[in-house]
Image (spheres, rainbow, N blue to C red):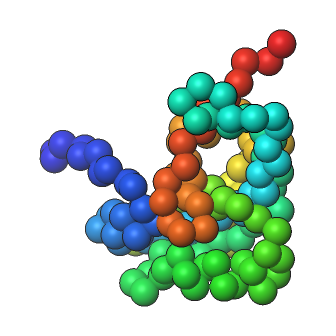
Amino acid sequence: AGKDRRVDIRTFDDLVRAGLAQRVPQRLLLVFIRTEPVGEAGEEGAASGTLSPVMYTDKLLVPGLTLAKLVREADAQTPDWDWVMVAALAGRRRGEMPTPAQAEEALQGMVKQVHAGGDFSSFAIFDRTGNTVRLAVAPRG
């Protein structure tokens, strides 16, 4: 058995390349998020605020999928978003694409996680230009 190699994802294009290198077909799950800043940027330029899901969709992970295409499609629905949260959903059986129903269930879970302000470490989050966004959950209190 081969070793699991971690891939350094810095841009949306990196994510697409890494996904296409997998043997199992995948759907990308996309939740478009509006950011609402609260107060001024703190130490190290970190800002605080709230996140609100605006819309979501899934896309087949295929060659030629670009963030520019996704931005155009999303903006045609509503330009009121700042970031896109992305996860990959692999088929349950080797060689089988995940169904739209499986994608919908996973997307609903992602939307709930945005509402709850949970742990986003298992997702890639990109700004409109395709660069990664790093989030830290503020302690509740």
Quarter of the picture containing the C terminus is top right
Task: Say which of 74 and 128 sits in front.
Answer: 128
Residue at x 82% of width, y 48% of height: 36
Residue 116 visible at all: no
Q: Please identify the residue farthest to the left as the structure is shown.
A: 2
Residue at x 55% of width, y 81% of height: 68
Task: Say which of 64 and 92 sits in front.
Answer: 64
Q: Is residue 62 above or below residue 133?
A: below
Residue 100 locus on image (x, y percent):
68, 72
Left or right, 22 with reference to 11? left
Left or right, 13 with reference to 49? left
Q: Is residue 83 above or below residue 43?
A: below
Quarter of the picture containing the N terminus is top left
User: Can you tell which quarter of the image residue 48 is in?
Assistant: top right
Residue at x 18% of width, y 43% of height: 3
Q: Is residue 139 above or below residue 131?
A: above
Residue 56 locus on image (x, y percent):
75, 66
Residue 79 locus on image (x, y percent):
79, 75
Task: Say which of 105 and 9 sits in front.
Answer: 9
Residue 77 visible at all: yes
Residue 9 locus on image (x, y percent):
38, 54
User: Can you tell which quarter of the image residue 120 is in?
Assistant: top right
